[in-house]
Image (tube, grey):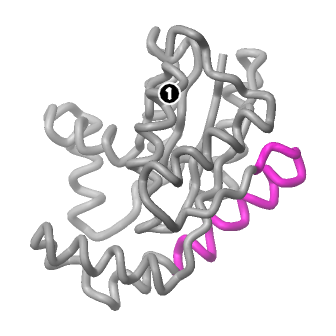
Amino acid sequence: MTRLLIVGPQGSGKGTQGVRIAEAYGIPAISTGDMFRAAVKSGSELGTKVTEIIEAGNLVPDELTSAVVRDRLSQSDAEGGFLLDGYPRNLGQVADLDAFLGGRGEKLDAVIELVVPRAESIERLTLRAKEQGRTDDTEQVIENRLAIYERETAPILDVYRAQGIALEVDGVGSLDEITARVIAALEGHGLTRSAAA
């Protein structure tokens, strides 16, 4: 049973690393971004709500995000553990997640913080925007997203540091180097991979 959260600023590579770590531990990688995109694609009632919010340029509210995550964590493939990416992203969502897991007699085992200098994040995101032709990723938009991360998401790390489960990992280097660092940090925290993974 391994329950993980991966946190890092936009451009830190947490999506890529999250999938790699989840595979190494044989658990599903659960990304709120992916869940919202799937909901939008499905055309469900939730998808319609999410589409309206995103098209208005707003963040999906906590209650809706928490409901989507609770539903996903209740699915059978997450019974043996999970890796969350993109949730919780603020203190309100931390409280929601703790209450939900606590109700099941569970808690997070570790929180992986990918540490990447701001200039590196901006450089990576600008490059990604060029490669993928993403016109919305202007330097101003990127700066704004990083400011939101620093203001809203960074404080959740204080909560997890106080619980002794936050693991800082240098997020600069090759994909393999960073993955190896994350796994070493998790193993140092007592979380060994299952033989099946």
Most foreground residue, 72 or 12: 12
**What is the x, y in percent for residue 116?**
56, 71
* Residue 7 visible in the displayed image: yes
Q: Which residues are magenta?
A: 147-166
- Which percent across, then down, holds residue 143? 43, 86
* Left/right of residue 152 with respect to residue 11 in the rendered view: right
Classify 133 as above or below 86.
below
Is 175 situated above or below 117? above
Badge 1: how crowded within 10 Å, few (<14), some, or many (20+)? some
The residue indicated by pointer 1 is 24
Q: Main secondary structure of the magenta part?
A: helix
Is 25 rendered above or below residue 51? above
Decide if residue 58 is on the left or right side of residue 187.
left
Q: Residue at x 25, y 77 (%)?
A: 127
Residue nearest the observer in this picture, 160 or 169: 169
Q: Is residue 129 above or below residue 4?
A: below
Q: Is residue 84 left or right of residue 13?
A: right
Residue depicted at x 52% and y 75%: 148
- Residue at x 23% of width, y 56% of height: 52
The verdict on residue 173 being magenta is no
